[in-house]
Image (spheres, rainbow, N blue to C red):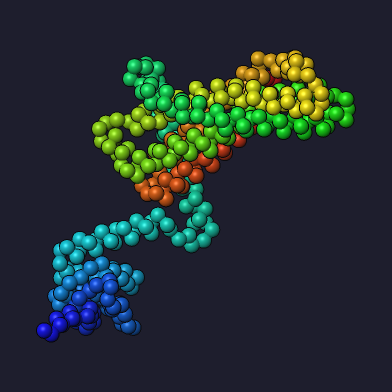
Amino acid sequence: MSPAPEPPAASATVRPVADGLEVVLAGEWRITRVVPSWSPGATRPARVGMRMDGVTSWDSSLLLFIADVEAWCRSQSAAFDGSALPEKVRALLTQLTSASAAARASHPHEGNIFTAVGVATHEVIGSLRAALHFVGECSIGFVGMARRPGKFRWRDCFDQMQQCGAMALPIVSLISFLVGLTLAYQAAEELRQFGADIYVADLVGLSIVREMGPMMTAVILAGRTGAAFAATLGNMRANEEIDALQTLGISPVEFLALPRLVALGVMMPLLALYSNCVGILGGMIVARGILQISPSAYWIETQSIVNIHDVTTGLVKATTFGLLIGLSGCLCGLRADRSASGVGRATTSAVVTALLLIIVADALFAVIFNLLHL
């Protein structure tokens, strides 16, 4: 029994016609076989027509060849005529061309520094507009929650409180203890030279309560909770769950972002208070071990220097930092690209944005509290 003959190989014949060139495709076009490439030569026709009457079977290799011809026609200002192609081929070619155009638009090639600056400025303005729109939606959501608290998703809020509050206690304890220990150790080395050992309690107490406690807690939650918010919402966007909520008439901001913002706004001050206590404990241990200061003397000195205004300023900072972390995490998650790489970029952007906002807000608080003599 003789073997079946192999189908004819793919071919593309270019022949001149009255108003340009005509490309006749024939044979079997398979990505696994050798296929011809587009090479019109030195001619610059006014029109290029395509026919595939002799094609026995085809796959994506045929579409790529036709797309190359169409792209060459655009670059040479020649008319591309695909009217003789089957309707299915034309439809697939339209989809391929649209996807290529979208990819080129999302990754533009900057010709010079002015174009790059213009594109970057346009992106920054768009991001600021989106951020302001998101903050406005959250503000409206908070007003609606105050008017109708029964419609707020308290169960989701309590779950998020557990995740960003109770579950963060171990890492907050470790970092706060080490920060208090480090501050006390560095201060002890200097104060011992002047016989002012007891003032290590003043330095550690004020530094922890006013600055390091809220700041270190915010940094921890920015990398832990803010990234988790962005990753969760980014995955929901990639899986079109957020689109489903919008189709049902449910606001993603009120349904997803608001419980997370409330949870962080409530838990951040509590975590900051806990961080203050653990940081002061770390300083007390160093003072007892190196400077031979008793815990009772250390505690009395801390009480004499730290007052309610210092604690209040730290709590105000912590609440603001918590809201900034929640806003950056939810915003980056809701604006993530619909892909795995988009979720990763959104997570990174959420952490970087949160840290930047925390530093800027802390600097503004320092100026404001100095002007108010707090």
Instruction: Relative to 4, say whether 353 is above or below.
Output: above
Query: In screen coordinates, is 368 left or right of 246?
Result: right
Instruction: Relative to 374, say whether 100 is above or below.
Output: below
Q: Which residue: 47% across, 43% down?
A: 347
Q: Which residue: 69% across, 23% down?
A: 280
Q: Position of residue 25 (x, y in %)?
A: 20, 77
Q: Which residue: 37% across, 42% down?
A: 235
Please tell me in which quadrant of the rendered image residue 130 appears.
top left
Nearest to the observer: residue 48 or residue 357: 357
Examine the rendering and report whether any part of residue 357 can be seen. no
Q: Position of residue 35 (x, y in %)?
A: 27, 77
Examine the rendering and report whether any part of residue 5 can be seen. yes
Please tell me in which quadrant of the rendered image residue 78 appears.
bottom left
Q: State the quadrant of the C terminus.
A: top right
Nearest to the observer: residue 347 or residue 282: 282
Query: In screen coordinates, is 188 left or right of 169?
Result: right
- Residue extending farthest to the right is 194
Q: State the quadrant of the N terminus.
A: bottom left
Q: Which residue: 39% across, 38% down?
A: 233
Please tell me in which quadrant of the rendered image residue 335 appears.
top left
- Residue extending farthest to the front is 1
Instruction: Relative to 358, say whether 38 is above or below.
Output: below
- Residue extending farthest to the left is 1
Q: Position of residue 180 (x, y in %)?
A: 69, 29
Q: Position of residue 167 (x, y in %)?
A: 50, 29
